[in-house]
Amino acid sequence: MSGQSTSVAQTPAMSASVVDHYLSEHAAVGPTLPALGVAWIDGLRREGRDAFAKLGFPTPRDEAWKYTRVAPIEKRAFRLQGELCIGFDEDDIAPFLLPTLACHRLVFVNGRYAPPLSKPGKLSPGARLMSMDRALREHADLLESHLGRHADPSANGFTALNAAFMADGACLILGARTRLEKPVHLVFLSIPQEEPVVAHPRNLVVAGEGSQAQVIESYASLGTGTYWTNVVTELVVGENATLDHYRIQEEHTRAFHVATLQAHQARDSRLRSHSVSFGAQLARNDINAQLDAEGSECVLNGLFMADGRQHVDFHTTVEHARPHGSSQEYFKGILDGRSRGVFNGRVHVHPGAQKTDAMQSNRNLLLSKDAEVDTKPELEIYADDVKCSHGATVGQLDPDMLFYLRARGIDGATARGLLTYGFAQDVIDRMPIPQVRERLSHTLLTRVPDAEHVKGMV
């Protein structure tokens, strides 16, 4: 499983007080967590707590974290938000919605479900959509086969903490042959407090046999203070099911965002996941797909942009465990200022997984001489009848293309903006929902060089 720590205990560099802080927090809130007394849920939380006590936070000594230092998170004593904090209405959150998209909407504030801002609407027969808090309290029997069975609590300190504090998030369960006519939009908003706060959203999507759905996760900030989002999402795609998944992260640049997406696919299932990272001071994204039956298909697309001193890290792992599986990964990064990007993509073809077809591509654009990117594509193949490829590029804007645009009367800054926009828009165009493409294109146009002039030309 991706992100597995190589350490067996906290390193000397990690103060015991850091671990003690979160263990004390857990002891304080433990009696208030939902579904207390349900044996398997208590066991999952206990497993997470014990794993964090053993591992602490990852360090550069851990291979999967050697390019990403989490000391800025470690050195702050983040605390859970107490009561649900809502002092605003739908007009205040409008900038984070998709106003022209008819959808089922759940809104969370600092990791807690906010019914006044949510519009779940009427779902198709056979579909259940609710907060994780409610699911744990009222429908634990529906969760037992999947919740915590795919995202390993001992993978690293972040997934361990998420399991230990598991309390709220979103839960979508689709019965066999259930098709959602409208997408589900999960909106996670964070409001900074006087002291740094943390939220540990836990999401579960189970797409039963032959079902079909579109799920959008959005993460944004209401305010400019420091906080930390630590989210785990498990996707279970049943036999012959189709799931389109989106993650849009545009939090404030004083925020920290750590996310794990763990997918498990059955026979002839199809998963298309699109991840976009625009915000946060430090953003880490682990995306893991287990193709555990013949004929499963997986598409992972991603776009990240960073400026200033932002740091963004994408780690992907695709496990081809059975024959006749296919996967495609297409990630692009744009780095400006003194920002740093990381892409580590691993494709693992297991023994016997013949006829696997896997493609991986990572292309990166550096807009300044001080920006950096580390890219590491990996293929690990233990079958002999496969078609696998990977590639990575790091470069600057094509001088010939810049000259071409300048020769046609476009000034240098606008030419750079147009080429940057085209480079990124290629990923956005791969997303099927028009309203998502429109929203991301608009955001993109605010971040490219000479944005005002570029807007008038595209």
Image (spheres, rainbow, N blue to C red):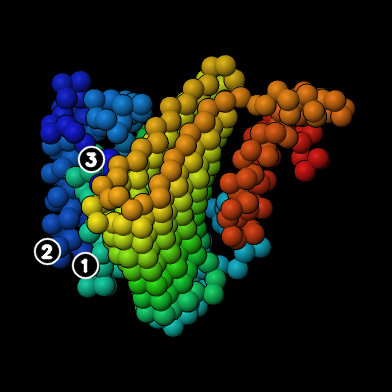
| Of labels 1 and 3, the one closer to you | 3
User: What residue does disc 2 label?
Assistant: 39
Query: Where is residue 187 shown, x and y percent of the image?
Result: 49, 55
Residue 248 makes an appearance in the image: yes
Name the element at disc 2. helix
Who comes first in sequence, dot 1 or dot 2? 2
Q: Which residue is at the far top?
A: 369
| Of labels 1 and 2, the one closer to you | 1
Q: Spatial distance from mark 2 to mark 3, Cα to Cα?
A: 26 Å
Name the element at disc 1. loop
Name the element at disc 3. loop
Quadrant (top left/top right/bottom left/bottom right) for the C terminus? top right
Residue at the image position 27 percent from the left and 30 percent from the top: 63
Amino acid under label 3?
Gln
Q: Measured along the vertical axis of the image, is residue 142 above or below residue 80?
A: below
User: What residue does disc 1 label?
Assistant: 144
User: What residue does disc 3 label?
Assistant: 4
**Is the residue marked by circle 1 packed among few (<14), some (14-19), or many (20+) residues within 10 Å?**
few
Residue at the image position 14 percent from the left and 51 percent from the top: 46
Who comes first in sequence, dot 2 or dot 3? 3
Quadrant of residue 230 within the rendered picture: top left
Amino acid under label 2?
Ala
Q: Which residue is at the far front?
A: 385
Residue at the image position 30 percent from the left and 64 percent from the top: 293
Residue at the image position 76 percent from the left and 40 percent from the top: 455
Position of 13 with respect to 111 (left or right) is left
Query: Where is residue 366 shown, x and y percent of the image?
Result: 57, 25
Q: Measured along the vertical axis of the image, is residue 308 above or below residue 123?
A: above
Residue 109 makes an appearance in the image: no
Amino acid under label 1?
Glu
Query: Where is residue 196 shown, x and y percent of the image?
Result: 37, 35
